[in-house]
Image: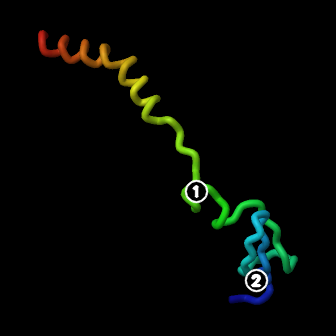
Amino acid sequence: MKDSIHPKYNEVQVTCSCGNQFSTRSTTATKQLHIEVCSHCHPFYTGKQKVMDTAGRIDKFRQRYAGKAAGKATAAKSA
């Protein structure tokens, strides 16, 4: 690895808005990094994400297009 073409890879202290702190390595020039969301408070990682009412949407879609799909199937059988 050439010394002059790669950025410095230093250890930084990361602080989240939830209060979680951890250290990692980064190419930033600062020794501290402040972030808004980390793996301890992000809804995807904590399992507290809001689930959309997809079942209601799917039922609505099926009700709307149920007659059209059945009509095509009977027309194909009679032909």
Q: How many marks?
A: 2
Question: Which one is earlier in the sequence, the residue at label 2 or at label 1?
Answer: 2
Where residue 44 appears, as percent x and y from the top left, is 58, 56
State the separation of the CA atoms marked 2 and 1.
29 Å
Amino acid type assigned to the residue bearing label 2 in the image: Tyr
- Residue 14, quarter of the rendered image: bottom right
Q: Residue at position x 45%, y 30% from top?
A: 56
Q: Nearer the viewer, residue 63 or 4?
A: 63
Instruction: Classify mark 2: residues with Cα within 10 Å, few (<14), some (14-19) or many (20+).
Output: few
What amino acid is found at the position of numbered circle 1 in the picture? Phe
The label on residue 73 is: none
Res 5 visible: no
Q: What is the basis of the colouring in this image?
A: rainbow
The residue identified by callout 1 is 44
Query: Can residue 22 be seen in the rendering of this structure?
Result: yes
**What SS does tag 1 mark?**
helix
Q: Quadrant of the N terminus?
A: bottom right
Q: Relative to 66, is 53 on the left or the right? A: right
Question: The residue tagged with tag 2: helix, strand or loop?
Answer: loop
Of all residues, the one furthest to the left in this rendering is: 78
Question: Which dot, 2 or 1, sits closer to the camera?
Answer: 1
Q: Residue at x 53, y 44 (%)?
A: 51
Mark sitting on residue 9:
2
The residue closer to the viewer here, 13 or 17, is: 17
Q: Residue at x 75, y 75 (%)?
A: 21
Residue 28 against residue 67 in the figure, above or below: below
Q: Residues within 10 Å of mark 1 (few under 14, many from 20)?
A: few
x and y, in percent, of residue 58 in the image: 41, 30
Name the one closer to the observer, 1 or 75.
Answer: 75
Residue 79, picture quadrant: top left
